[in-house]
Image: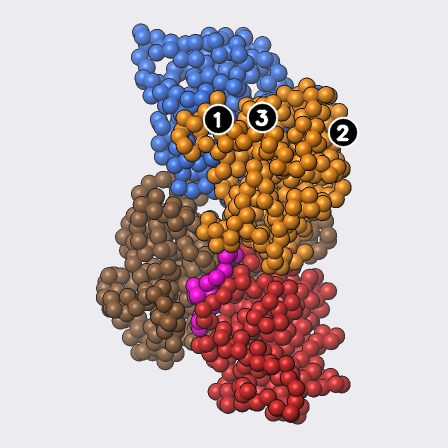
Chain colours: A red, B blue, C orange, D brown
Amino acid sequence: MKFTVDEWFVVLLARTIRPAETVFHGFGSPCAQVAMHVARRTHARDITLIEGAMYAVNPDPPFIPPTSNDASLKRGAAYSMRFEEFFDAAIRGDVDRMFLSGGQIDGYGNTNVTAVGPLERPKVKLGGGGGGCNLAATIPHLSLWSSRHRSGRALVESCDFITDMGHRTPSGDRAELGFTGGGPQWMVTELGVFDFPDGHARLTHHFPDVTVEEIRAATGFELRVAGDLRTVQPPSGAELSALRAVDSLGVRRGEFAPKELDRVFDHDPAVGCAC
Amino acid sequence: MKFTVDEWFVVLLARTIRPAETVFHGFGSPCAQVAMHVARRTHARDITLIEGAMYAVNPDPPFIPPTSNDASLKRGAAYSMRFEEFFDAAIRGDVDRMFLSGGQIDGYGNTNVTAVGPLERPKVKLGGGGGGCNLAATIPHLSLWSSRHRSGRALVESCDFITDMGHRTPSGDRAELGFTGGGPQWMVTELGVFDFPDGHARLTHHFPDVTVEEIRAATGFELRVAGDLRTVQPPSGAELSALRAVDSLGVRRGEFAPKELDRVFDHDPAVGCAC
Amino acid sequence: MGLQPHRNKVVDLAAAIADVRDGAMIALGGGLSARLPMAAVREVIRQGRRDLHLVGSAHSIDVDLLVAAEAVHRCEESYVGFEQDLGLAPAYRRAAETGTIEVAESCCVTILAQLRATEMGLPFLPVRGVRGSDIRRLHPEYGEVTCPFTGEVLVAVPALKPDVALLHAPLGDRYGNLHLEQPYVLDERFASASMRVVATVERLVSTEDVAASGVTIPAHLVAAVTEVPFGAHPASCYPNYAYDREHLSGYVKAAQSGGEDLAGYLKTYVYGVADEREYRDLIGSERLAELGRWPESTVDWKGLFQ
Amino acid sequence: MGLQPHRNKVVDLAAAIADVRDGAMIALGGGLSARLPMAAVREVIRQGRRDLHLVGSAHSIDVDLLVAAEAVHRCEESYVGFEQDLGLAPAYRRAAETGTIEVAESCCVTILAQLRATEMGLPFLPVRGVRGSDIRRLHPEYGEVTCPFTGEVLVAVPALKPDVALLHAPLGDRYGNLHLEQPYVLDERFASASMRVVATVERLVSTEDVAASGVTIPAHLVAAVTEVPFGAHPASCYPNYAYDREHLSGYVKAAQSGGEDLAGYLKTYVYGVADEREYRDLIGSERLAELGRWPESTVDWKGLFQ
């Protein structure tokens, strides 16, 4: 069974979700959005899925549209939270996991979705952080992602602007800042997967078509590598078909540079897989 | 046209309401409740009437029941506020007038609905203040009432316990306490009507069957009397018929000592009235 | 805390209440004569709970009955009574006057702020009034906070997180989605701020049916749900039934008289019935049907209050 | 402030917007691609307003168009853009990069807290995050407050009271009762916290009809109401119509190119039409009907996004 990098990427994101968690994605995050629905249809059927920007609880959308608050995203949900209801739940710690990305991400998992370049006269004004600058402080677990790692501009030595706080900012670590959430737990990129032991990103898995040296070259912060570095686990047939059913419009593909989408993989028939 | 003291009393309460105001009564306050509906059907048709404990906006109840949150009290209302929606509006100053009473009321308009006697071992534990101890601080105008003035126990030198703040408490005046509301504006009793110049009650009107000396004897605080003391203005025919239509169950009568209800008046045919 | 996972939460009343511990902080849903969780209250008494800390706004027989059964240690409500109609709450009054309960009388707005603090994940919230009121003397735990912008000194109240909220709703599904009619009172706030929500419902129906009426309190806030027809009696649960003024009046008389009369009420309506089915049988299907007849005509409706 | 008295509040769009002053703080209802008050936005531009201070959560063409028309001085939103699909907001981006607007980017939770402070009658509220984020550098007006119970230092944010909230709703009556579908976004909070609420509605109907659908925002919070079919176009206004992705895509291209292309868009769709009737004619009844055809089948619905 063949699959493309965007599919594998989304499956890896989905796997950061644990059963029974309450999970949320921000708007404009199709990969995370699709990943949540994949998780709910595979290994984590009992999650409470909160649809970003619609705040619908456990919907079954007929398709994922390219905008985050289309009414299709509340189909099948008995309830949609009010804006404040969602944010209150997240601030008091009742939302277990949020997906976050950024134009820049540093080694501590700080993210910049505000501006590249000096704040007074930015080189690129990005869209902005939504609710991240409070949510990142309180949500127990963050799953970060970047689909532009290879560009060399996404994973940086230090963010030009810290919108959402990771494990440590120049103002202090999470304990010093009084944050109740646990910070970034995983980071998935189109090159590999990181965890955050001691609050700093560490490469634990890489895609089979990418070398550690390529990853190091694309990474602006010091690349720490796990002793037991492995290749990422392939998606199962169930995961791929869930993904294809959920995202029939392919909105996830919009997050990738066109060239990345040419990366096609195949299950090695010689290797056992869960499909 | 004959009418009883409870009717006259409610009409006087109704007249403390000015056109276009937003008005509210607490639960367990049938006289104030009926008065608001009388005002809305006579001189103040454009008020925003918020039904106490139901928080229905401008309802037309088929009758006033003896409990404050029966569904009859939201009949005809397109909208009922949520609990917090009402209290927020009141605290930010958007509710112009509230009706308040108390087991004890002092000359500054402080009211006690908590306990008579020492707090640690009260002689009578009253029901409690509902939202009064915050609302009394912020609502622009308060209309107080007591239907038990003659008892000598209602209007007191000083309250055993201040639940809701009038113009001045031992902790300071309203400015010193940082209160944004204006405090008590009127007080209607079954013996007469008071205003609050300089923050202290002053008798401005008395019922025709009651003398100032009787009122003084029933009043625990120093009785101040307006220079142009008058008898209370009789109810108009329109006011009486509005009242009788609204309160067909006569719930207002429960607030009075049985003997008071024997006080029957008649429009003096020799005197012009608005009926 | 965490949200409740999406699963079947139907249990029987005894099991739902078994999680209430002695000494627990309990939030009672509804208010005055509307949607009081009376079946749950009766079961709490039957199970012999003690030293409860009650928090809420304006309540009546729910609190008074718990006090009468000596289940209460501290009462932090804004009002307990039977309004102008039936007067002071007899058992509450007696317990307050003899000092057998701790009266921590509060204010609707303050309780709201304290629940909101929990709901919003904050350790405190400021309130505007309270200063100058003796209510503050009942709450040495309150603090003060100065506004960094205006310099105003406001009373600061700590977040309040009830251990259990007991709510009653006309409709619910097995996952705990609840439909309520106005007044919601503090039920929504209790649901978000409490550790655990136990709901009784008039009728368990499909999720589609609850959604069609409108979900007021979502399943992810509810831990247990149990079907108890007339579970608010003698309070009202519209659109199903009005309150039972006659029954309440009988209760108030028994409670005023106290002693054997009050014990008799408790024996007859609480201890003497094994469950709520027996309670309904005791009240009688005829009387219960009468209370549900309010929509037939204004005359019928009004008749219930005469 | 005071609540709005119960009276007929129907005015035409030009009159409703005439109260918006240069320099006003404006809250825009809806968010992203849903229920943006686009007719009101176009009228604000037509009337030549300047120096506006925009506040809100996540927005797109509403803010971008106001910035493109040079109507904005300060932008205090949590996000401005066209999501992953159509990308950065071109006019906003250009104005931010060249310094012609003041970017006071905020956070959904902070804006919510600031509106709630006004709604709750408080001068400030504490928030839990913000510390450690550079968002704080954009807001020297924030303060700090120490919890009197836990000793925690929290960021304190001042109450925010917009001069005008521009909201769009599918249904309303002449008194200003509004029915909205989820997501309500901040509309309810804006309605309580703003000095003045101006509402456009797809259809003016009887109070009974609004009440039957459910009043989301009550008349006493609304100052003026005006009927504007397709008043959210090119955003969606469910259940009436989906967003017009093709139109938005065309706008983004024009705005990216800037100069004459952007001026051309403004001329064609804003300055060149006298009113919203002309705007609808310009978009064309066929296209508008297409956007309303989403309920017919999933295929039709999905087709709007391909």
Highlighted range, magenta: A65-81
Q: Which residue is mark 1?
A: C304
Q: Chain of mark 1?
A: C
- Indicate which disc residue C100 carries: 2
Q: Can residue D117 be seen from the camera position used here?
A: no
Residue at 48% x, 54% y is C208
Marks 1 and 3, the one that precedes in the sequence = 3
Q: C306 or C208, which is in the foreground? A: C208
Instruction: Residue D180: name its quadrant.
Output: bottom left
Q: Nearer the viewer, mark 1 or mark 2?
A: 1
Q: Secondary structure at mark 3?
A: helix
Q: In the image, what residue type sits under mark 3?
A: His
Tell me if residue A206 is in the magenta stretch. no
**Number of numbered discs present?**
3
Q: Chain of mark 2?
A: C
What's the magenta bit mostly, secondary-structure-wise?
Answer: loop
Question: How far from the left and from the top, in percent, is residue C119?
Answer: 61, 52
Q: Which residue is mark 3?
A: C247
**Vertical placement of B172 versus B31: above or below?**
below
Q: In the image, what residue type sits under mark 2?
A: Thr
Residue at 29% x, 66% y is D288
